[in-house]
Structure formats: C-alpha cells, structure tokens
Amino acid sequence: MNKRFLSAIVSVLLAMVAIQSGASFAKQLFPIAGPEGTSALRAFFAAAILSIIFKPWKARLSPRGWRNVIFYGLCLGAMNIIFYLAIARIPLGIGVALEFTGPLAVAFFSARKKRDFAWVLLAVVGVCLLLPDIGTSPDSLDPVGVMLALTAGAFWAGYIVFGNKTGSEGSGGVTVTLGMLVAAFAIVPIGVISQGEVLLTPFALFMGVAVGVFSSAIPYTLEMNAMRNMPKQTFSIMMSVEPAIAAIAAFIIIDETLTVSQWFAVALVVVATAGSSITQRQKQVETLS
C-alpha cells in the first residue's frame, strides 16, 4: 500500500468523523438557533471558508455549467436544512441511514442486473425495520422526522446528479464552493427570518463556525484529497460506513443511543451501500474487459 493511497484512506475516515461530529455539534445548537438558524450559520461560514481556500471568483463556467451549479447548490442547501430539521426529531445515526436512500435511489434507477436490485432491496429492508418503530412507545421514531430524513435523501440524489453534471466545469473545489455559495444565499435568509438576532450571539457564532468547519470545510477538503489519490469505487465503499460513524459520534458527543433493532437496520443500510458500490465497480470492469 503506497503512501498516497494510505493518506487517502485516512482522509476519508477523518472526513466522515468530522462531518458527523459537526452534525452532533449542530444538534447542541438547535435549542438556541433552531435547525434553520444552525443551517444558516453552517452555510455562511462554510461558504466563507471555502471561498478563501478555493477562490471561486476565478471560475469560468459555461451558461449550462452555471445552471447545473445553481441546481447543485439548491439541492445542497435543501438537503442540509431538511436534514437538520430531521435530526432535531430523530437520532443522528438513523437520520443518516434514512438519508442514504437518496444515493441508493440513484443506484436503483441506474440498475441493470438483478444483483443491483438486490442491494437496493436490502436497504429498503433496513429502512422498513426502522419504520415499525414509529409510534407512541418510548423508543418510537417521530414520523415527521422520518419523512424529513427521506426528503433530505431525495435532495441528496439531486445533489449527486447535478454534482456529476458539473464535473467538467472547473476544479472540484471551485464547484463545491460555488454550490455552497448558492446554498448560503438560499438558506441564510430563512435562518435570519426564523431566528433573528439570536444568530449574532457569541455562543451561536462560535458553534456556527465549529459546525461550518467540521461539517463542510474540513470534510470537503479531505474528501477531495482522497478522491485524487484513490479509485472512486473505493471512496464510495468507504463512505458507506457513514451511518454507523454518525451513530457513534452522536453517542460520544451528545450521549444519543440506538436500540439493538435500530443498530441492525443501520447495519443493513451500510452493507447495502457497500454492496452497491462493489457491484458498480464489477460492472465497470466487465464493460472494459
């Protein structure tokens, strides 16, 4: 294993830990700034930090490229704010697992063989194991939170689709930054209208910087380093463990626990995502051979 590939593996792991730690920090900010205000602070500081790093004003995009970037940014912003609204109601690990239905939906609609559908079916089983837990028992899930997480997943699918379309338009860092700027223009007014001057309190600003750094600036930078030094398929497979990392981060930072059945359901989504990634890799190899 060469040093560049090892560095890429470490980058992916650190990126996942950072982004889910940032989400845990965000939940601590919810009682003060609400999900809307927290999303606004995250988008604002993430856009500012990424702009300093990648200098998006140097971008030269075609009209079609600008259109794709705008849709990419709107999906990014919607995904973030709706996901925060979801995890204000349900545990972080479950929210991430439900949100993963977005990428899996993309895999489903691009599926051509039975094994492709099998992985999606396994993920559906995992989600269904969570759904019976919606109700009035102490361990039940908030149905609104579940629907919000699934909606965030739908916007994640759009984020992937339009993100791929922007691939030929400039560097990845510039594209991400432009998308985050679009997201900030869409989200910040919502947060300001919803929460007002509370966003300017020292604690809210401090936590907003922390969330922006941990949830966006650090992981996006690390992920770009990883994607430059490892196959995309390996990157996708490693990302599949993110729901489990989210649950662990939430347990460590905010003492949020899952039931045994919920852990099992999250594990099924992890396995389904990894399996789907492996299948896509095998399909690419068969096509080339």
Image (cartoon, rainbow, N blue to C red):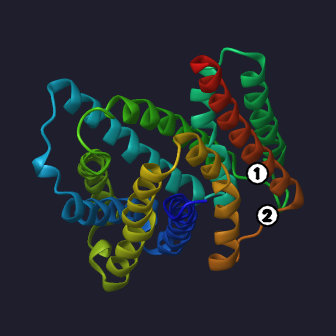
Badge 2 crowding class, 10 Å Cα cut-off, few under 14, some 14 to 19, many 20 or more, is: some
Task: Answer with the quarter of the image where residue 111 lies.
Answer: top right
Q: Is residue 71 left or right of residue 131?
A: left
Measured from the top left, where is residue 252 in percent x and y? 68, 78
Amino acid type of the residue that numbered disc 2 sits on in the rendered structure? Leu
Which sits in the foreground, 27 or 194?
Answer: 27
> Which residue: 74% across, 22% down?
117
Q: Relative to 189, is 171 above or below?
A: above
Mark 1 touches mark 2? (CB < 8 Å):
yes
User: Does dot 1 land on a helix, a strand or a loop?
Assistant: helix
User: Does dot 2 land on a helix, a strand or a loop?
Assistant: loop
Sooner in the amino-acid sequence: mark 1 or mark 2: 2
Measured from the top left, where is residue 211 in percent x and y? 42, 70
Figure label count: 2
Res 91 seen here? no
Q: Name the quadrant of the N terminus.
A: bottom right
Q: Relative to 187, is 28 above or below?
A: below
> Which residue: 47% across, 37% down?
155
Residue linked to disc 1: 266
Q: Is residue 5 left or right of residue 36?
A: right
Hey, which residue is sitting farthest right in the picture? 260
> Which residue: 84% across, 43% down?
129
